[in-house]
Image (cartoon, grey):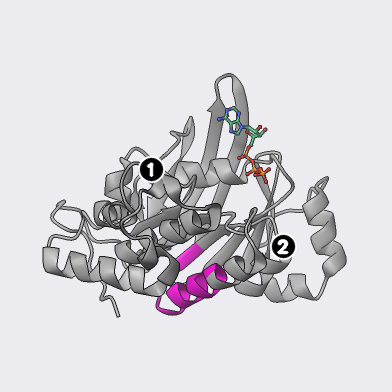
Amino acid sequence: MISRRRDAGLGILAPRAGAPALSVEGIQCSYGQVQVLFDAGLVVEEGEMVALLGPNGVGKSTTLKVVAGLLRPDAGVVRLGGVDVTSAPTRERIARGLGQVVGQATFSSLTVTENLRMHAYTIEDRVWAQEAVDAALAVFPRLYARRDQPASTLSGGERQMLALAKAIVQDPRVLVVDEFSLGLAPVVVGGLIELVRRLNERGTAVLLVEQSVNVALSLVDRAYFMEKGEIVACESAGDLAADPDRVRDLMLGGHTTAVTA
Ligand SMILES: Nc1ncnc2c1ncn2[C@@H]1O[C@H](COP(=O)(O)OP(=O)(O)OP(=O)(O)O)[C@@H](O)[C@H]1O
């Protein structure tokens, strides 16, 4: 099993004791002149698994891109372990324990193994880095069989596996995942879900955007619901599972409920 190893040589401050794994506060974000996030905020505590749900086009993926450092917000703060990373490059976020399965960011001309090695770059101990790559490949026999193929030749499901294998290499403190069930066969989704569950059981906090509400609610502790770029509700998965009508209403939008947690 991979041991925790962080802050490799970047001179990065330790996270604040007791701070959430991830917090997002007051995010405003635009594509050109069009604003899509309005004061969006959420919290993922250490070791927690949380979903971000809502109708199409309300800003869920945009929120994850802001967390991952792929988009710079117009206003607001992103913190990892209590440390403000709003202006930090992706490399620093990874070093602070952020793993991301957002936008399938693989290097398509590099092989599967080379892609994993790229994502082990924050690990100073090169022997340990190789062990981490081997451990990640061991989780996915399909990827192991394709380890010397360019990532461009992988299927959609195999690319999602590679994206999660990257996260295993990084051994993240908090993992953000954007819609891994989209377009994948149920058997592949089942395997990916199991892996995310195992990562979470080992202590990785998870923020999940997922089209399938059933998949999401079977996994998470809490769910935030987003509408038109704002968080409109936050409820426990247990309460939501007992109230399918409320879940349907929240997923259809048109809600004005205040955030309760
Ligand atoms: N690169 C982009 N350029 C311009 N507009 C964009 C871009 N990406 C997303 N948008 C717009 O921003 C809004 C929010 O998109 P986003 O992908 O964050 O929503 P979402 O809630 O994740 O949707 P879905 O559930 O359909 O994936 C949408 O209106 C979308 O059309």
Dot 1 falls on a residue whose secondary structure is: loop
Q: Is residue 195 magenta?
A: yes
Counting from the top left corner in percent of width and height, residue 248 is at 83, 59
Left or right for 215, reference 160: right
Q: Quadrant of residue 167?
A: bottom left
Residue displayed at 64% across by 54% down: 182
Q: Which of 106/69 is in front? A: 106
Residue displayed at 40% across by 64% down: 143
Q: Is residue 64 magenta?
A: no
**Which-is-in-front pick, marks 2 and 1?**
1
The answer for how far apart the CA atoms under marks 2 and 1 are is 31 Å
Mark 2 in CB contact with mark 1 (< 8 angstroms):
no
Residue named by callout 2: 213
- Tell whether circle 1 marks a residue whose Cβ is less than 8 angstroms from ligand 1: no
Residue 108 tag number = 1
Quarter of the image with the N terminus in it: bottom left
- Which quarter of the frame holds ligand 1? top right
- Mark yes or no: residue 232 visible: yes
Q: Which of 209/186 is in front? A: 186
**Amino acid type of the residue tagged 2 in the rendering:** Val
Count of marks, rendered view = 2
Q: Which residues are magenta?
A: 192-206
Q: Is the stretch drawn in magenta largely helix, strand or loop?
A: helix
Counting from the top left corner in percent of width and height, residue 19 is at 39, 63
Residue displayed at 79% across by 55% down: 250
- Name above or below for residue 261 compared with residue 85: below
Counting from the top left corner in percent of width and height, residue 122 is at 21, 55
